[in-house]
Amino acid sequence: MIRKRFDDSSCSVARALDEVGDWWSLLIVLQAMYGTRRFVDFQRELGIARNILCDRLERLVSNKVLRKVDVGEHGSRFEYRLTDKGRDLFPVVIALRQWGDKWNPAPDGQALDLRDRASGRPVGTMQVQDADGQPLTIRDVFVREEPDTRQTANRKTR
């Protein structure tokens, strides 16, 4: 089976999925957000096969979502840490979690109780907002096919 790559696509969703689109990669990122750093801990927490974990970690490092840090005192020992690019996946992961809790809840019906560390209050539902902070739905947005060249030209001349 030939895997199509989307790194040259004009669709930003396709390009993003090219880097972190398979479920193992996102689960590794989620575990890294929980503080997991070592290969053996990722393997234990996820129950993932060693070869798959090696492949996904290598890809996440090459895509600069994680960075590999040598922390060995006696020989080589590495940790995998989120980069800024990896930390920027936080709202994506939270949105997926909330979507999953709504449409595919855990067998026991219990959603993860995610709370703001500073206030202790529950984290709100992720939503797309307009420039004034008002919620938007899919029906409230459109994709502008071609940029307004006059605006672009005016911006360049200022």
Image (cartoon, rainbow, N blue to C red):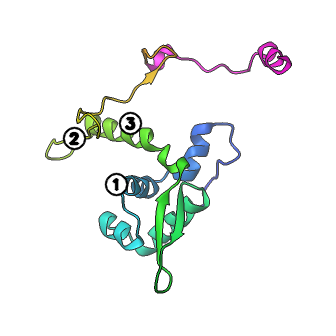
User: Which quadrant is home to the C terminus?
Assistant: top right
Q: Which mark, residue 95?
A: 3
Q: Which mark, residue 34?
A: 1
The residue lying at 21 percent from left, 45 percent from top is 106
Disc 2 target residue: 113
In the image: residue 102, left or right of residue 129 = left
Q: CA distance from mark 3 to mark 1?
A: 16 Å
Q: Earlier in the sequence, mark 2 or mark 1?
A: 1
Residue 129 screen position, x and y as percent: 46, 20
Q: Residue furthest bottom?
A: 74
Q: Is residue 17 above or below residue 123?
A: below
Name the secondary structure under disc 2. loop
- The amino acid marked with disc number 1 is Tyr
Q: Is residue 114 above or below residue 68?
A: above
In the image: residue 112, left or right of residue 65 = left
Residue 2 screen position, x and y as percent: 61, 60
- The amino acid marked with disc number 3 is Ala
